[in-house]
Amino acid sequence: MAGGRERVAHLLRQLQRAACQCPAHSHTYSQAPEHAPLRRTDYAFEMAVSNIRYGEGVTKEVGMDLHNLGARKVCVMTDQNLCQLPPVKAVLNSLTKNGITFQMYDDVRVEPTDQSFMDAITFAKKGEFDAYVAVGGGSVIDTCKAANLYSSSPESDFLDYVNAPIGKGKSVTVPLKPFIAVPTTAGTGSETTGIAIFDYKELKVKTGIASRAIKPTLGMIDPLHTIHMPERVVANSGFDVLCHALEAYTALPYKMRSPCPSNPINRPAYQGSNPISDVWAVHALRIVAEYLKRAVRMPDDHEARANMHLASAFAGIGFGNAGVHLCHGMSYPISGLVKSYRAKDYNVDHPLVPHGLSVVLTSPAVFTFTAEMCPERHLEAAEILGADIRTAKIKDAGLILADTLRKFLFDLNVDDGLAAIGYSKADIPALVKGTLPQLF
């Protein structure tokens, strides 16, 4: 048992070290080199999150906010699927009503690439905007983060801010423009975090631009927008919330993270599980357990969809400070190496494994493995998701959570493993190769 626990702890520690450099969900204050640490492991944690506003119909306030900020020329970013739907119309109506001049960019790519980021950046630079609004899911919000960053730092090369080792991982020191995110999916929590994820096509890997400086000024969570989500989008977005919560709660505790920074500017946002992130993660997990199936099965269940919208933000606060681990680490090559799979209910012109699906497919295997690190938390998570643990043995925590997850996912018609999305045994070496940079 002790040997297994140490093996898991070692791997999770490697993930946290790497989180300062390359995984797509990491973000740090600085990429500056460390001086000799005063302690082997850390002793402190801190919390950071965007301002959040929640309420049905709250989107009508976005124009007022921009007027209050003194914005004169605003960039509105969205995608082709959303540009004619109510969420975008609500934003544009508010801007018009409040006399805000704007231009719209509706060519955001679902699951962005380095090229789609650069196209949006070019638009932003030409527009010389003084504020930004993103209306959409994580792809739109992340693209807008990149556009805001590079238009505010026009002389920078694209790879300057991309996470090392793919990019240079430079610290963001330039002031950015005000940025309001209006999420239309209940999944990524991107409205709360400072990360912009994209596919780097040359290497066929996912990476990100990572800094607390690029997080939205305000995340405007309007549950009315979630009623337009198709069934599979609701499910796959919800799977991301599920894994954000589970991974944050079972992350290596912050006091076990090493090395301890000699200067607080070098303390990463992915600090490990801690008393505050635990609260958000567990609460998000309870909401997922109660409302995700209802939200998927009944599009008119506004209560369920509204609660999942909140759960997305709650889990974002949890994982944005504690971190995620193996499910996300292995998800990037699963989505980045996609062959011909096209997810149902996603109106895109390219093969696509949605992020939430790529994350959740490995979750039963992951939590079977990680349970030796904190079995009590794995059992607690299983109970929240519906397992009867009254006679459970602590040594079976991982298997119990794995079985509970399988039942939960099959009830939601999840694709049955990697084979169902087009992979075979022959792809395992490539999937492993794509995972290793996330760990080391």
Image (cartoon, grey):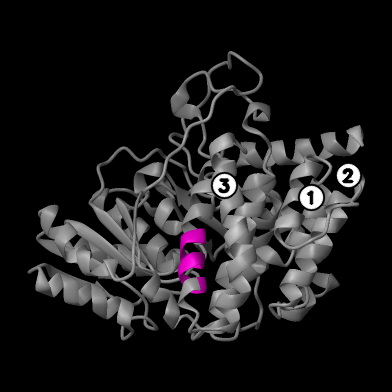
Residue drawn at x 22%, y 64% as measured from the top left: 62
Image: 227 above or below 161 = below
Q: Is residue 308 located in the magenta-colored stretch of the structure?
A: yes
Labelled pair 1, 2 in contact (Cβ < 8 Å): yes
x, y percent for residue 378: 77, 49
Main SS of residues in magenta: helix
Label 1: few (<14), some (14–19) or many (≥20) C-alpha neighbours in 10 Å: many
Q: Secondary structure at mark 2?
A: helix
Label 3: few (<14), some (14–19) or many (≥20) C-alpha neighbours in 10 Å: many
Residue drawn at x 65%, y 46% as measured from the top left: 249
**Magenta-drawn segment:** 304-311
Q: Is residue 390 located in the magenta-colored stretch of the structure?
A: no
Real-space CA distance between mark 3 and mark 1, rounded to the nearest whole angstrom: 31 Å
Residue drawn at x 44%, y 27% as measured from the top left: 265
Residue labelled with disc 3: 22
Residue labelled with disc 2: 394
Which of disc 1 and disc 3 is earlier in sequence?
3
x, y percent for residue 368: 83, 54
The label shown at residue 379 is 1
Locate residue 235: give its quadrant: bottom right
Labelled pair 3, 2 in contact (Cβ < 8 Å): no
User: Identity of the amino acid at label 2?
Assistant: Ile
As drawn, the residue found furthest toward the front would be 390
In the image, taking residue 55 as reference, residue 64 lies left or right, namely left
